Every structure is written in C-alpha cells, then in structure tokens.
Amino acid sequence: MTLREIVRTTLLFVFYLALQILLVRNLVLFDYAFCFVYIACILMLPLDTSLTLLLVTAFVTGLIVDTFYNTLGMHAAATVLMAYFRPIIARTQIDQSGQEFRTEVLLQDLETGQFFRYVLILALIHHAALFFIEASSLTLLIPTLIRIGASVLFTTVSIMLLTFFTKR
C-alpha cells in the first residue's frame, strides 16, 4: 500500500466510525431496522489485506463501537466474524476474470450488482451474529429474523448511497 492509500483508508475509517457514533446511532426505523454503517470500514479495506490485520482491525472497530453503545463486545464479535468470512465472500462475489487481482473494493470500480451482493452478504453475516447474540435465546426467533432482514436492507442501502456519493 502506498502512503496515499493508507491515508485515504484511515480517513474513511474515521469518517465511518464518526458517522456511526454521532449520527446513525439514533437512526432506527419502526423499532426493527437499525443502521450499522461502520461495517463499511472493514468492507472497503483493500482485498490484499492480510487476514491477521483484517481481524485485528475488525476487533478494534467493533470495540470502539461497543464502547459508545455500551454493548460489552457484541459488535466486536460480530465484526470479527464478518471480517473472517470477507475473503471468501470477496472471492466468490467479485468477478476477477480477465483482470489482474483487484486490490480495492469500490462501487466505482465494480459493477453495482457485484458490490450490492458483496455488501448484502457480509451485512447479513454481521447482523445475524449481532442480533442472535443480543437475543441470546430462540424464544424471540421471529422478531429477531425480522430485525435482521430489515437492518440488513437498511444498512446495505445506506452503505451503497454513502459509497455512491463519496469520490476517490
């Protein structure tokens, strides 16, 4: 990574975390759809990032969000799980045919459908882990599944809109 890419990635990291903590934290639709745009910090990291660095970054990101949400490691656990599956999902969802290995995951570089599926699947993994940890039992299965589905759609659309309006 060049110095420019490191600075750009760090600024995006700070932007998404600040946006989550200061603004999006209070954004809830119908008591079911929650928006967690901070997962874009992990989604937008370059694809050639080592798994160790990816997991440590995910843990620190989740821990920062946990500190402000007072959730005792739930976001950290869900974000680390999402980061663990990220290389597999990226290999299966991002088409690499006829190109050298792509290093960045940006809406401007990918087809909209590929980027949408990539974000949707990883948001589903994150939200399923987060809401099942929060529910801590299967007695509230239906409300938990509704909350997962609504939040995944809300988060995916929010991340798509944010990346659409952010320039390189």
Image: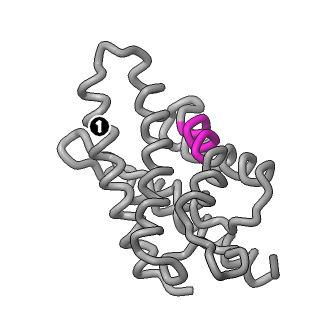
Along the horizontal axis of the image, is 156 left or right of 45?
Answer: left
Residue range highlighted in magenta: 75-82
How many marks the image carries: the answer is: 1
Q: In what element is the residue under mark 1?
A: helix
Q: Quadrant of the N terminus?
A: bottom right
Query: Of all residues shown, which one is farthest toward the left?
Result: 30
Q: Residue at x 57, y 53 (%)?
A: 89
3 shown above or below 17:
below
Q: Position of residue 27 (x, y in %)?
A: 30, 53
Any magenta on residue 5? Answer: no
Q: Position of residue 11 (x, y in %)?
A: 63, 73
Crowd band around label 1 with a 10 angstrom C-alpha radius: few (<14), some (14–19), many (20+) = some
Q: Quadrant of the C terminus?
A: bottom right
Q: Quadrant of residue 111?
A: bottom left
Is residue 101 visible from the viewing direction of this image? yes
Q: Residue at x 52, y 43 (%)?
A: 68
Q: Residue at x 22, y 39 (%)?
A: 31
Along the horizontal axis of the image, is 47 left or right of 133?
Answer: right
Closest to the observer, 26 or 55: 55
46 shown above or below 79:
below
Residue for badge 1: 147
Q: Residue at x 40, y 70 (%)?
A: 113
Is residue 17 visible from the viewing direction of this image? no
Closest to the observer, 87 or 31: 87
Please identify the dominant SS of the magenta region: helix
Which residue type carries mark 1? Arg
Q: Position of residue 131 (x, y in %)?
A: 41, 32
Q: Quadrant of residue 14?
A: bottom right
